[in-house]
Image (cartoon, grey):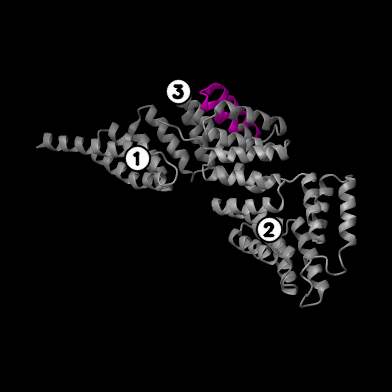
Amino acid sequence: MTYEDFDRNSNSINSPQEFQKTSDQWIAEGDAHCRSEWYQAALVAYEQALLLTPDNAYAQQGKSHASARIKPYEGAATSYEKAIQLPPYLAQEYYKTGNTLYRLGSYDAAVTAFRQAIASAPGFTQAYQGLGNSLYRLRHHMEALSAFEQAVRTDPNYVEAHYSRGVTLSTLRRYQEAIIAFDQTLQISPYDAGAYYNKGIALYGLKRYEEALFVFERAINLAPDNALIYHNKAKALYGLKHYAEALEACDQALRLAPAYISIYNNKGNALYGLKRYQEALATYEEAIRLDPQDVRTYHNKGKALYGLKQYEEALQVCELAIQLAPQDARAYYNKGNILYALKHYEEALKAYEHSMRLDPTNAQTYRAMNKAFYSLKSYRDALTASEHALPLESDKTSKTWAPWKMGQLKQTIRMLKQIIVRCFHKER
């Protein structure tokens, strides 16, 4: 029996918005905006740099340079946005208010302020950006995407809008479109490590692991001290089954961020891939010590115990995962695998059926049910389970799955049909 790797669906690891730009990257962005005479955007970039490095003389100089070139009451406009339909200071004041509310975490109020700024100045690019940021924080992703797209329409060279659009598309799992958005970001700002990082995540989402690895390497060259890049590089290496290299990348990530739980899970997965189950178990236990409420780590700990054939202990860990996340189909799937290994086929079947009710689209569960029914010599039910799995496997095969799995499943169905025919003749 295979034990599902539960780190692959973890949004907490993959979230593109986790990447933080460095002070140097904000300065480079400010310089680019100054060269294009977009001084308000440059001012924002320099201010972000100063939040990270308050004594940075270059950022202070850039801020002074940008501020001196912003016309009174027109600071929020791009170089070609000269006309404002209502009194200009209203749009600027609403915009400032929106930024303040956003920094305070009052995202609903920030949305209102940014919309008032846009009503005062319909071509106000930065206000659309602020609106999109606030909506994204509220998880209103489609509305956020619309705001970022409007920002791009008002200023096609506004790099932050392209970047944010890519992040949002990636969050929506529209990875191919996200890649295009990050490529557009890199055309404007070719040294943006965050754009490379997020492009890598989108490629990873498409299971294009080789390409993702290449892009993460580019991001590391630009931001060598960012633990998240090494962490996601390890995930790409894991996807390629380069477990030893994935382990090295995890160790590098942990040197930079020794308390980041997701990296421990990733490291444990690499050790598991190397069949170093005892070390994987110790790594997962360290993650649990750091955060006893992270259900993902219990899944992974159960996986290591399963690999060690410590089935009774694995079952206990599975029950803990179910207590933490009773609606998580994966926990019941794992429980079924453990019970199957213990040859408790009827109990395994009940666990698989529970998993199937929570997630009826998982072909793995139907295949596991097939094995449990077969072990119970319930061949008709085994055939039914395999036939349920077939269209689900077919859908996966059309995307990323290997064709041999489909062939294996079809062979199982043919074998079951032959068994049923033989049983029918015996009964007669």
- Please name the amino acid that badge 3 sits on: Lys
From the image, state whether disc 2 or disc 3 is nearer to you. 2
Where does residue 294 sit, x and y in percent of width and height? 59, 38
**Magenta residues (range):** 265-292
Q: Which mark is residue 406?
A: 1
Disc with the residue nearer the chain's start (1 vs 2): 2
Mark 1 or 3, nearer chain start = 3
Q: Is residue 196 left or right of residue 411?
A: right
Dividing the picture into quadrants, the one containing residue 234 is top right
Left or right of 191, for residue 409: left
Question: Gap between marks 1 and 2, in whole Å?
Answer: 42 Å
- Quarter of the figure that contains the N terminus: top left
Residue depicted at 42% across the width and 43% down the height: 355
Amino acid under disc 2? Ala
Q: Position of residue 41 (x, y in %)?
A: 78, 59
Label 2 environment density (alpha carbons within 10 Å; few <14, some 14–19, many ≥20) = many
User: SS at mark 3?
Assistant: loop
Question: Looking at the image, is 80 positioned above or below residue 317?
Answer: below
- The numbered dot on residue 309 is 3
Quadrant of the snapshot with the C terminus: top left
- Residue at image position (35%, 30%) is 344
Query: Marks 2/3: CA distance?
Result: 51 Å
Q: Which residue is mark 2?
A: 161
